[in-house]
Amino acid sequence: DQQVKQNSPSLSVQEGRISILNCDYTNSMFDYFLWYKKYPAEGPTFLISISSIKDKNEDGRFTVFLNKSAKHLSLHIVPSQPGDSAVYFCAARDTSNTGKLIFGQGTTLQVKP
Amino acid sequence: NAGVTQTPKFRVLKTGQSMTLLCAQDMNHEYMYWYRQDPGMGLRLIHYSVGEGTTAKGEVPDGYNVSRLKKQNFLLGLESAAPSQTSVYFCASSYSKGLISPLHFGNGTRLTVT
């Protein structure tokens, strides 16, 4: 069973507009949520995170929103730039002592100039 | 400034062959992980280690073995490769489990089993 789901495999937006990437989860025991960005032929790189006790975290053009009642989080990129074109993975950390992450399937974002 | 290094970058195996994927990190991280990435499946955890000499199973451990004899190295072994193990394998490390310590990933090993 997929505990972290990204139901949109791809998203295309125009440069300068907002990109919204969505993620749903089923496990109430997750304590942190993270977004990773991945370019082709490279490993994922950490982008932004949010604790389960918060509902928003902002870092420059990137903002993550968490709606615990809906078990939903989203990543907003404003304004979108062509260099943001990549695969974005949502991940959640379980509350055990290992810190291991459960990843979603990924969403491919294309930002058109 | 190497970070996490994976070798090899590419490999083609025949069914039944064995191989070992190597992962080395130079950040003195305690935690190390092996993930596989498949289309439509995201990244799935195979095995992980919370310190030198320790290993544990992740979500999809069957068909793989691991060893962490030295803190900086985490090896992933395939004893008898199967076509279902065709995937991109990523090694990652993190400093601790505590305050969120993001994973640092290597650039992956693309494995094809024919």
Image (cartoon, helix red, strand yellow):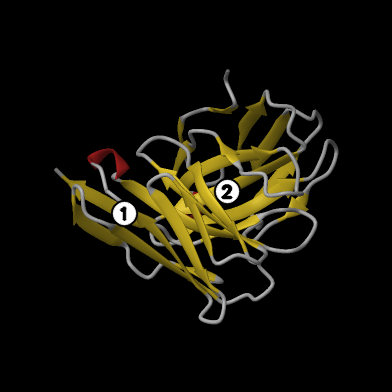
Image quadrant in which you'd find residue B106 = top right
- The answer to whether residue A12 is left or right of residue B66 is left
Where residue B89 appears, as percent x and y from the top left, is: 52, 43
Where residue A81 appears, as percent x and y from the top left, is: 25, 43
Where residue A107 appears, as percent x and y from the top left, is: 35, 58
Where residue A19 appears, as percent x and y from the top left, is: 29, 57
The amino acid on which the numbered mark 2 sits, given as a three-letter code, is: Tyr
Q: Nearer the viewer, mark 2 or mark 1?
A: 1
Farthest-out residue, top: B1
When the figure is inspected, residue A20 is found, relative to residue B32, above or below; the finding is below
Q: Residue at x 81, y 31 (%)?
A: B69
Q: Which mark is residue B50?
A: none
Q: Residue at x 69, y 26 (%)?
A: B27
Farthest-out residue, right: B53
Task: From the image, tell me which residue sits under label 2.
Answer: B35
| Secondary structure at numbered mark 1 | strand
Farthest-out residue, bottom: A69
The amino acid on which the numbered mark 1 sits, given as a three-letter code, is: Thr
When the figure is inspected, residue B35 is found, relative to residue B109, above or below; the finding is below
- Quadrant containing the C terminus of chain A is top left
Task: From the image, tell me which residue sits under label 1.
Answer: A108
Label 2 Cα crowd, 10 Å radius (few <14 / some 14-19 / many 20+) = many
**Residue A65 vs residue A107, the one in the foreground:** A65
When the figure is inspected, residue A98 is found, relative to residue B79, above or below; the finding is below
Image quadrant in which you'd find residue B95 = top right
Q: Chain of mark 2?
A: B
